[in-house]
Image (cartoon, rainbow, N blue to C red):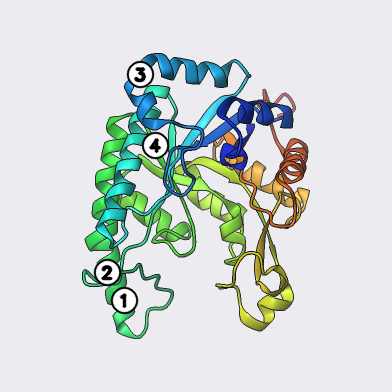
Amino acid sequence: MRIGVFLVLFQNLPFEKALDKAVAAGVNAVEIGSGGYPGNHHCPVDDLLESRAKRDEYLEAIHSRGLVLSALSCHYEPLHPDQAIAKESDEVFRKSVRLAQLLEVPVVNVLSSLPAGSADDTQPNWVTCPWPNHFTEILDYQWDKVGIPYWRSASQFAEQHGVQIGVEMHPGMLVYNVETMLRLREACGPALGCNFDPSHLWWNGVDPVAAIRQLGNAIVHVHGKDVYIDPFNVMVNGVNDGKPYGHIPDRAWTFRSIGYGHDAKTWKDIISALRMVGYDYVISIEHEDAMMSTDEGLAKGIALLKEAGISEAAGELFWA
Protein backbone atom coordinates (compact mmCIF):
# COMPACT_ATOMS: atom_id res chain seq x y z
CA MET A 1 0.00 0.00 0.00
CA ARG A 2 1.34 3.42 -0.99
CA ILE A 3 1.07 6.73 0.84
CA GLY A 4 0.04 9.58 -1.44
CA VAL A 5 -1.11 13.17 -1.28
CA PHE A 6 -3.90 15.08 -2.97
CA LEU A 7 -1.71 17.61 -4.76
CA VAL A 8 -4.30 20.39 -4.48
CA LEU A 9 -2.60 20.92 -1.11
CA PHE A 10 0.19 22.64 -3.06
CA GLN A 11 -2.01 24.44 -5.59
CA ASN A 12 -0.06 27.69 -5.06
CA LEU A 13 3.09 26.05 -6.51
CA PRO A 14 3.94 25.27 -10.14
CA PHE A 15 3.45 21.62 -11.11
CA GLU A 16 7.01 20.38 -10.83
CA LYS A 17 7.70 22.32 -7.64
CA ALA A 18 4.56 20.77 -6.17
CA LEU A 19 5.85 17.32 -7.15
CA ASP A 20 9.19 18.12 -5.52
CA LYS A 21 7.34 19.17 -2.37
CA ALA A 22 5.46 15.85 -2.35
CA VAL A 23 8.67 13.86 -2.75
CA ALA A 24 10.41 15.83 -0.01
CA ALA A 25 7.47 15.15 2.30
CA GLY A 26 7.95 11.41 1.80
CA VAL A 27 4.98 10.24 -0.28
CA ASN A 28 5.22 8.05 -3.37
CA ALA A 29 1.89 8.80 -5.05
CA VAL A 30 -0.05 11.89 -6.08
CA GLU A 31 -3.73 12.47 -6.76
CA ILE A 32 -4.28 15.44 -9.06
CA GLY A 33 -7.31 17.67 -9.56
CA SER A 34 -8.62 17.81 -13.11
CA GLY A 35 -11.37 20.39 -12.58
CA GLY A 36 -14.53 21.08 -10.64
CA TYR A 37 -14.16 21.89 -6.95
CA PRO A 38 -10.49 20.75 -6.75
CA GLY A 39 -9.59 22.89 -9.76
CA ASN A 40 -7.02 21.87 -12.36
CA HIS A 41 -4.02 23.84 -11.05
CA HIS A 42 -1.61 21.02 -11.94
CA CYS A 43 -3.49 19.43 -14.82
CA PRO A 44 -3.91 21.35 -18.11
CA VAL A 45 -6.59 18.93 -19.28
CA ASP A 46 -7.20 20.28 -22.78
CA ASP A 47 -3.49 20.53 -23.60
CA LEU A 48 -2.86 17.00 -22.37
CA LEU A 49 -5.81 15.60 -24.31
CA GLU A 50 -4.54 17.19 -27.51
CA SER A 51 -0.84 16.28 -27.33
CA ARG A 52 0.81 12.91 -26.74
CA ALA A 53 4.15 14.68 -26.38
CA LYS A 54 2.77 16.82 -23.56
CA ARG A 55 1.29 13.73 -21.89
CA ASP A 56 4.64 11.97 -22.09
CA GLU A 57 6.37 15.00 -20.60
CA TYR A 58 3.73 15.24 -17.88
CA LEU A 59 4.07 11.59 -16.86
CA GLU A 60 7.86 11.79 -17.01
CA ALA A 61 7.77 14.61 -14.47
CA ILE A 62 5.77 12.34 -12.15
CA HIS A 63 7.48 9.00 -12.75
CA SER A 64 11.04 10.34 -12.78
CA ARG A 65 10.50 11.38 -9.16
CA GLY A 66 9.46 7.88 -8.15
CA LEU A 67 5.79 8.83 -7.94
CA VAL A 68 2.66 7.24 -9.35
CA LEU A 69 -0.46 9.15 -10.37
CA SER A 70 -3.15 7.43 -8.31
CA ALA A 71 -6.24 9.28 -9.57
CA LEU A 72 -7.63 12.33 -11.29
CA SER A 73 -10.24 14.12 -9.21
CA CYS A 74 -13.04 16.31 -10.55
CA HIS A 75 -15.59 16.52 -7.70
CA TYR A 76 -18.40 18.73 -8.98
CA GLU A 77 -22.18 18.92 -9.55
CA PRO A 78 -23.46 16.96 -12.59
CA LEU A 79 -26.91 16.51 -10.97
CA HIS A 80 -27.34 20.20 -10.14
CA PRO A 81 -30.67 21.74 -11.27
CA ASP A 82 -28.80 24.65 -12.86
CA GLN A 83 -28.23 23.16 -16.29
CA ALA A 84 -25.15 25.28 -16.95
CA ILE A 85 -23.46 23.88 -13.83
CA ALA A 86 -24.59 20.33 -14.63
CA LYS A 87 -23.32 20.58 -18.21
CA GLU A 88 -19.96 21.98 -17.15
CA SER A 89 -19.64 19.24 -14.52
CA ASP A 90 -20.38 16.51 -17.04
CA GLU A 91 -17.88 17.94 -19.51
CA VAL A 92 -15.19 18.07 -16.82
CA PHE A 93 -15.96 14.48 -15.84
CA ARG A 94 -15.86 13.12 -19.39
CA LYS A 95 -12.64 14.94 -20.20
CA SER A 96 -11.14 13.57 -16.98
CA VAL A 97 -12.12 10.02 -17.93
CA ARG A 98 -10.67 10.38 -21.42
CA LEU A 99 -7.45 11.82 -20.01
CA ALA A 100 -7.22 9.13 -17.33
CA GLN A 101 -7.35 6.47 -20.03
CA LEU A 102 -4.59 8.17 -22.00
CA LEU A 103 -2.43 8.57 -18.89
CA GLU A 104 -3.21 4.99 -17.78
CA VAL A 105 -4.68 6.25 -14.51
CA PRO A 106 -7.23 3.72 -13.20
CA VAL A 107 -9.56 6.02 -11.20
CA VAL A 108 -11.43 9.30 -11.58
CA ASN A 109 -12.75 10.56 -8.24
CA VAL A 110 -16.07 12.41 -8.01
CA LEU A 111 -18.94 13.40 -5.78
CA SER A 112 -22.32 11.91 -6.61
CA SER A 113 -23.78 15.45 -6.60
CA LEU A 114 -27.34 16.15 -5.48
CA PRO A 115 -30.46 16.92 -7.53
CA ALA A 116 -33.20 19.35 -6.69
CA GLY A 117 -36.37 18.17 -4.99
CA SER A 118 -38.38 18.37 -8.21
CA ALA A 119 -38.00 19.41 -11.83
CA ASP A 120 -39.17 22.91 -10.87
CA ASP A 121 -36.68 23.57 -8.06
CA THR A 122 -33.60 25.75 -8.50
CA GLN A 123 -31.36 24.39 -5.72
CA PRO A 124 -30.31 20.90 -4.57
CA ASN A 125 -32.30 19.42 -1.70
CA TRP A 126 -30.74 16.97 0.78
CA VAL A 127 -33.40 14.83 2.47
CA THR A 128 -32.58 13.31 5.87
CA CYS A 129 -36.07 12.19 7.00
CA PRO A 130 -38.87 10.16 5.33
CA TRP A 131 -41.77 12.21 6.71
CA PRO A 132 -43.73 14.30 5.86
CA ASN A 133 -44.41 12.26 2.74
CA HIS A 134 -43.13 14.87 0.33
CA PHE A 135 -39.61 13.94 1.46
CA THR A 136 -40.09 10.39 0.18
CA GLU A 137 -41.44 11.78 -3.09
CA ILE A 138 -38.31 13.94 -3.37
CA LEU A 139 -36.05 10.91 -2.85
CA ASP A 140 -37.90 8.94 -5.53
CA TYR A 141 -37.43 11.81 -7.97
CA GLN A 142 -33.75 12.30 -7.10
CA TRP A 143 -32.85 8.64 -7.48
CA ASP A 144 -35.13 7.39 -10.26
CA LYS A 145 -35.42 10.46 -12.46
CA VAL A 146 -32.02 12.11 -12.08
CA GLY A 147 -29.29 10.28 -10.15
CA ILE A 148 -29.46 6.74 -11.49
CA PRO A 149 -30.00 7.73 -15.16
CA TYR A 150 -27.03 10.12 -15.11
CA TRP A 151 -24.58 7.85 -13.30
CA ARG A 152 -25.60 4.80 -15.32
CA SER A 153 -24.63 6.67 -18.49
CA ALA A 154 -21.46 8.02 -16.83
CA SER A 155 -20.49 4.53 -15.68
CA GLN A 156 -20.92 3.12 -19.15
CA PHE A 157 -18.71 5.91 -20.49
CA ALA A 158 -16.03 5.19 -17.89
CA GLU A 159 -16.17 1.46 -18.57
CA GLN A 160 -15.73 2.06 -22.29
CA HIS A 161 -12.52 3.94 -21.47
CA GLY A 162 -11.18 1.36 -19.02
CA VAL A 163 -11.53 3.68 -16.02
CA GLN A 164 -13.30 3.28 -12.68
CA ILE A 165 -15.25 6.03 -10.97
CA GLY A 166 -14.48 6.66 -7.29
CA VAL A 167 -17.57 8.21 -5.68
CA GLU A 168 -16.77 9.89 -2.37
CA MET A 169 -19.53 9.34 0.19
CA HIS A 170 -20.24 12.87 1.41
CA PRO A 171 -23.11 14.27 3.51
CA GLY A 172 -25.18 16.71 1.51
CA MET A 173 -24.90 14.52 -1.59
CA LEU A 174 -27.08 11.76 -3.02
CA VAL A 175 -24.42 9.23 -1.95
CA TYR A 176 -23.42 9.87 1.64
CA ASN A 177 -23.13 6.45 3.31
CA VAL A 178 -22.54 2.78 2.54
CA GLU A 179 -26.17 2.00 1.75
CA THR A 180 -26.51 4.81 -0.80
CA MET A 181 -23.08 4.00 -2.28
CA LEU A 182 -24.00 0.38 -2.88
CA ARG A 183 -27.45 1.30 -4.16
CA LEU A 184 -25.94 3.48 -6.87
CA ARG A 185 -23.29 0.87 -7.72
CA GLU A 186 -25.92 -1.86 -8.04
CA ALA A 187 -27.96 0.33 -10.39
CA CYS A 188 -25.01 1.50 -12.50
CA GLY A 189 -22.53 -1.36 -12.60
CA PRO A 190 -19.05 -2.20 -11.29
CA ALA A 191 -17.30 0.68 -13.08
CA LEU A 192 -18.83 2.87 -10.40
CA GLY A 193 -16.88 2.35 -7.18
CA CYS A 194 -16.03 4.19 -3.98
CA ASN A 195 -13.33 6.69 -3.09
CA PHE A 196 -13.33 5.82 0.61
CA ASP A 197 -12.87 8.80 2.95
CA PRO A 198 -13.38 7.84 6.62
CA SER A 199 -13.62 11.43 7.84
CA HIS A 200 -17.14 11.94 6.47
CA LEU A 201 -18.30 8.67 8.00
CA TRP A 202 -16.98 9.23 11.53
CA TRP A 203 -19.01 12.34 12.21
CA ASN A 204 -22.13 10.52 11.02
CA GLY A 205 -21.59 7.82 13.63
CA VAL A 206 -20.26 5.21 11.16
CA ASP A 207 -17.44 2.81 12.02
CA PRO A 208 -15.05 2.94 9.03
CA VAL A 209 -13.91 -0.66 9.58
CA ALA A 210 -17.50 -1.91 9.38
CA ALA A 211 -18.04 0.25 6.30
CA ILE A 212 -14.95 -1.19 4.60
CA ARG A 213 -16.09 -4.74 5.33
CA GLN A 214 -19.48 -3.99 3.77
CA LEU A 215 -18.10 -2.14 0.72
CA GLY A 216 -15.49 -4.80 -0.10
CA ASN A 217 -14.22 -4.59 -3.66
CA ALA A 218 -16.32 -1.51 -4.34
CA ILE A 219 -13.43 0.52 -2.87
CA VAL A 220 -11.20 1.75 -5.72
CA HIS A 221 -9.33 4.61 -4.01
CA VAL A 222 -8.87 5.86 -0.43
CA HIS A 223 -8.49 9.31 1.10
CA GLY A 224 -6.51 9.74 4.31
CA LYS A 225 -8.29 12.37 6.38
CA ASP A 226 -9.26 12.51 10.05
CA VAL A 227 -11.95 14.35 11.98
CA TYR A 228 -12.33 15.43 15.59
CA ILE A 229 -15.83 15.09 17.02
CA ASP A 230 -16.50 17.55 19.84
CA PRO A 231 -18.46 15.54 22.43
CA PHE A 232 -19.84 18.59 24.26
CA ASN A 233 -21.19 20.28 21.14
CA VAL A 234 -22.60 17.01 19.81
CA MET A 235 -24.41 16.34 23.09
CA VAL A 236 -26.05 19.75 22.80
CA ASN A 237 -26.83 20.01 19.07
CA GLY A 238 -26.10 16.69 17.35
CA VAL A 239 -23.73 16.12 14.45
CA ASN A 240 -25.28 18.03 11.56
CA ASP A 241 -23.60 21.42 11.58
CA GLY A 242 -23.86 24.28 9.11
CA LYS A 243 -21.50 26.68 10.85
CA PRO A 244 -18.37 27.75 8.92
CA TYR A 245 -15.38 25.41 9.27
CA GLY A 246 -13.37 28.14 10.95
CA HIS A 247 -15.75 28.31 13.94
CA ILE A 248 -13.96 25.37 15.56
CA PRO A 249 -14.93 25.92 19.24
CA ASP A 250 -18.63 25.96 18.31
CA ARG A 251 -18.75 23.14 15.77
CA ALA A 252 -19.83 19.53 16.29
CA TRP A 253 -16.83 18.28 14.33
CA THR A 254 -13.68 19.55 12.63
CA PHE A 255 -11.45 17.99 9.99
CA ARG A 256 -8.03 17.18 11.44
CA SER A 257 -4.69 15.82 10.32
CA ILE A 258 -4.39 12.05 10.56
CA GLY A 259 -3.89 11.05 14.20
CA TYR A 260 -5.49 14.18 15.66
CA GLY A 261 -9.03 12.83 15.55
CA HIS A 262 -8.37 9.11 15.96
CA ASP A 263 -5.31 7.29 17.24
CA ALA A 264 -2.81 5.01 15.51
CA LYS A 265 -4.66 1.84 16.58
CA THR A 266 -7.79 3.07 14.83
CA TRP A 267 -5.86 3.73 11.62
CA LYS A 268 -4.15 0.33 11.90
CA ASP A 269 -7.59 -1.26 12.08
CA ILE A 270 -8.67 0.68 8.98
CA ILE A 271 -5.61 -0.38 7.01
CA SER A 272 -5.98 -4.00 8.12
CA ALA A 273 -9.63 -3.95 7.03
CA LEU A 274 -8.64 -2.53 3.64
CA ARG A 275 -6.13 -5.35 3.19
CA MET A 276 -8.75 -7.88 4.31
CA VAL A 277 -11.09 -6.83 1.45
CA GLY A 278 -8.23 -6.84 -1.07
CA TYR A 279 -7.42 -3.14 -1.33
CA ASP A 280 -3.68 -2.64 -1.82
CA TYR A 281 -3.40 0.65 -3.68
CA VAL A 282 -2.98 4.22 -2.36
CA ILE A 283 -4.04 6.14 0.72
CA SER A 284 -4.06 9.71 -0.53
CA ILE A 285 -3.75 12.28 2.25
CA GLU A 286 -6.24 15.13 1.94
CA HIS A 287 -5.17 17.91 4.30
CA GLU A 288 -8.07 20.07 5.51
CA ASP A 289 -6.94 20.86 9.05
CA ALA A 290 -7.70 24.48 10.00
CA MET A 291 -5.50 24.20 13.11
CA MET A 292 -2.30 23.00 11.43
CA SER A 293 -0.14 24.20 8.54
CA THR A 294 -0.12 22.17 5.34
CA ASP A 295 3.51 21.12 5.80
CA GLU A 296 3.09 20.07 9.42
CA GLY A 297 -0.26 18.40 8.84
CA LEU A 298 1.07 16.38 5.93
CA ALA A 299 4.18 15.40 7.86
CA LYS A 300 2.14 14.23 10.85
CA GLY A 301 -0.19 12.24 8.60
CA ILE A 302 2.65 10.57 6.72
CA ALA A 303 4.39 9.62 9.97
CA LEU A 304 1.28 7.96 11.36
CA LEU A 305 0.48 6.12 8.11
CA LYS A 306 4.05 4.85 7.94
CA GLU A 307 3.59 3.42 11.41
CA ALA A 308 0.13 2.00 10.68
CA GLY A 309 0.63 0.98 7.06
CA ILE A 310 1.25 -2.44 5.57
CA SER A 311 3.59 -2.25 2.59
CA GLU A 312 4.69 -5.84 1.99
CA ALA A 313 2.81 -8.93 0.85
CA ALA A 314 1.87 -11.27 3.68
CA GLY A 315 3.82 -14.20 2.24
CA GLU A 316 3.41 -17.89 2.97
CA LEU A 317 1.64 -18.97 6.16
CA PHE A 318 4.64 -21.04 7.25
CA TRP A 319 3.20 -21.64 10.70
CA ALA A 320 -0.10 -23.11 9.49
Q: Earlier in the sequence, mark 1 or mark 4?
A: 1
Instruction: Residue type at mark 2: give it.
Output: Asp
Residue 193: % across, % down:
42, 44
Q: CA distance from mark 3 to mark 2?
A: 44 Å
Q: CA distance from mark 1 to mark 3?
A: 48 Å
Q: Residue at x 69, y 75 (%)?
A: 250
* Residue picked out by circle 3: 51
Q: Earlier in the sequence, mark 1 or mark 3?
A: 3
> Of helix, strand and loop, which one carries label 2?
helix
Label 4 packing within 10 angstroms: few (<14), some (14-19), many (20+) = many
> Of helix, strand and loop, which one carries label 4?
strand
Position of residue 1 relative to residue 197, above or below, is above
CB under 8 Å between discs 3 and 2? no
Position of residue 270 relative to residue 232, above or below, is above
Q: CA distance from mark 2 to mark 1?
A: 6 Å
> Of helix, strand and loop, which one carries label 3?
loop
Q: Earlier in the sequence, mark 2 or mark 4?
A: 2
Can residue 186 be seen here? The reply is yes
**Looking at this rendering, what residue extends furthest in the bottom direction?**
132
* Residue picked out by circle 4: 164
Instruction: Decide if residue 124 is on the left or right side of residue 217.
Output: left
Q: Quadrant of the C terminus?
A: top right
Instruction: Residue type at mark 1: give it.
Output: Thr
Can residue 280 be seen here? The reply is no
CB under 8 Å between discs 2 and 1? yes
* Residue picked out by circle 1: 136
